[in-house]
Image (cartoon, grey):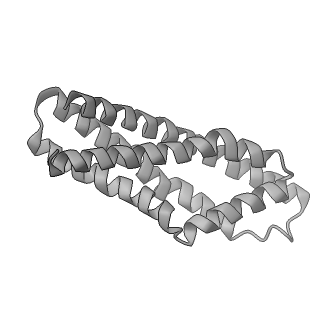
Amino acid sequence: MDLFQITLLLATLLSALVAGMVLTFAIVVMPGIRTMGDRDYLRAFKVMDRVIQDNQPIFMLVWLGSAVLVLAATVWGTWRLEGLDRIILIVAGVIYIFGVHVPTVAINIPINNQLQAQDLDSASETELRALAETYETRWIRWNTIRTVIAILTTVLLLALLIRA
């Protein structure tokens, strides 16, 4: 196994871990905390988000490492691979960066930051309901998109590894 194959293998592993994280949020975490009242729901999300924003090292290694390694494997593979293998890798790299990481930076993090800035203790029940609905609809939509794309990327990278 050469350095490119190791890079591709690690990119696949980390993208699979990211897919698992966003999938867990989609099917367990968000539905679970949504059973709480609006204040507790929003507070629970703020607490989880704070752990991430405080640069939890393993999360950061997986999340940022996946972007770096998928990008590195894609660039490297563009020169190294040919035909269908090259196309699979380029598609996987492009959809992963633009379907998982760009929306995270452009959409999910700003939504999280807006929620972090809210004083939930002084908000009325009506304000909390509006905040929860506004926040939840957009955040969950984009998390679903990130989940589907992260899973698709992982499948493409696994297919490429099997072909190699």
* Quarter that holds the C terminus: top left
Q: Residue 60 location, x and y as percent?
A: 46, 63
Q: Is residue 145 left or right of residue 119?
A: left
Furthest-right residue in this view: 125
Q: Is residue 49 left or right of residue 124?
A: left
Asked if residue 113 shows in the view, the reply is no
Q: Residue 103 location, x and y as percent?
A: 47, 50
Q: Is residue 103 left or right of residue 6?
A: right
Does residue 32 lie above or below 83 as drawn?
below
Q: Nearer the viewer, residue 58 or 136?
A: 58
Q: Nearer the viewer, residue 40 or 108?
A: 40
Which residue is pictured at 85% across the width and 66% down the height? Answer: 123
Q: Residue 88 location, x and y as percent?
A: 25, 32
Does residue 78 lie above or below 122 as drawn?
above
* Quarter that holds the N terminus: top left
Q: Nearer the viewer, residue 30 or 106?
A: 30
Which residue is pictured at 24% across the width and 50% down the height? Answer: 7
Write down the quadrant of residue 65 in the picture. Answer: bottom left
Which residue is pictured at 61% across the width and 58% down the height? Answer: 111
Asked if residue 72 shows in the view, the reply is yes
Furthest-front residue in this view: 1
